[in-house]
Image: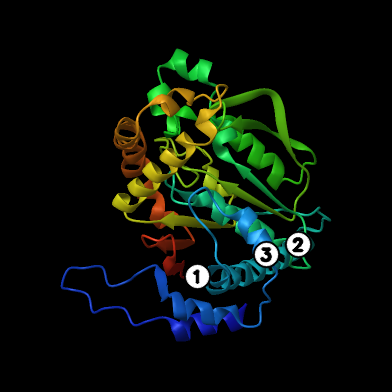
Amino acid sequence: MNEILERLAALTPALPRPNRGDLQFSPYRVFNREQWSRLRADTPMTLSPPELEQLSGIIEELSVEEVETIYLPLSRLLNLYVAAAQELHAVTSKFLGRLEGKVPFIIGVAGSVAVGKSTTARVLRALLARWPDHPRVDLITTDGFLYPNAELERLGLMTRKGFPESFDTTRLLNFLADVKSGVAQVEAPVYSHFHYDIMPGQSAVIDSPDILIVEGLNVLQPARLPTGGEAIPFVSDFFDFSIYLDADPEIIEKWYVTRFMRLRSTAFRDPAAYFHRYSQLSMPEAEKRALEIWSTINRRNLEENILPTRQRSSLILKKGANHRIEQVSLRRL
């Protein structure tokens, strides 16, 4: 771990001289692509082109160069963090005089709708599972912890689906507490984007993973602090490391509309799809509707709830217009 921290310090560009009255300390070390790629060291490329194609998103095509430049250094860093966490757990158990079971390392992945969270989470899962010390890596999205549509309708929250209040946060916290405590066979509800709803009677089972990746819109959202000071956990309290996928809102808007239009000509055409009605719209009408959904729901959620949590993350991946990650910001220890 010391080795990589020394290399991080050597590669960190000098911070600009602050203006009078500005805060003189940044909590992050900032790297461009070239600086970050050097931290890959001898980490091998373990994904083949066909695997990258499967891991790519609806509008985001992964390249070998992107994985080698950004994700291999990140997987190396996370591997070091996992090893350090395991060592700390062993030392603490020895101090307490008790033999405790394995504690999963939990990684949170946050960011806006359409920014590429799912793709990043899938790539990290594939890469981290190739390291020998933690072969069991699971991935879950917090979409499964949304209230069912019927409950959202009852609460008047259908137009705020994806906002913090539309999630069953208590259920999510209990799920994470069980996983972090080493409970075997922890069940999570399953969400279908095709049906746009929770699937009754279906569940995903998380069974003592070495690493769990939790991907979702509001996973870094803090709870309102109680005036009495009693303990109220945040979802992020269970994270050992967190990643925020970042891009300018105007760029994300274009990605959202592009994805909407692609789904309109594919998945939405199925009569069983929740959004089948949008496949019947003309192209101008569909683009207009996509922009309306973005501006009234997703952009509002981004500005009010998601973007303010960016500085709570361990790492920020800043994307450019072509989905390439142009800048990496790593929180100082």
- Mark 3 is surrounded, within 10 Å at the Cα level, by few (under 14), some (14 to 19) or many (20 or more) other residues, namely many
Q: Quadrant of residue 256?
A: top left
Name the residue nearer the viewer: 200 or 237: 200
- On the image, the x and y values in percent for residue 283 come to 34, 34
Q: Nearer the viewer, mark 2 or mark 1?
A: 2
- Left or right: where 204 falls relative to 316: right
Under mark 1, the amino acid is: Leu
Under mark 3, the amino acid is: Val
Q: Earlier in the sequence, mark 2 or mark 1?
A: 2
Q: Nearer the viewer, mark 1 or mark 3?
A: 3
Q: Nearer the viewer, mark 2 or mark 3?
A: 2
Q: Quadrant of residue 186?
A: top right
Q: Which residue is mark 2?
A: 134
Q: CA distance from mark 2 to mark 3?
A: 8 Å
Q: Which residue is mark 3?
A: 82
Colour setup of the view: rainbow
Badge count: 3
Relative height, residue 197 to residue 31 (above, below)? above
Q: Earlier in the sequence, mark 2 or mark 3?
A: 3
Q: Residue at x 46, y 67 (%)?
A: 331
- Mark 1 is surrounded, within 10 Å at the Cα level, by few (under 14), some (14 to 19) or many (20 or more) other residues, namely few
Q: Are marks 2 and 1 in contact (CB under 8 Å)?
A: no
Relative height, residue 8 to residue 191 (above, below)? below
Q: Are marks 2 and 3 in contact (CB under 8 Å)?
A: yes
Q: Secondary structure at mark 2?
A: loop
- On the image, the x and y values in percent for residue 195 come to 57, 26
Label ID, residue 333? 1
Q: Residue furthest right?
A: 99
Q: Secondary structure at mark 3?
A: helix
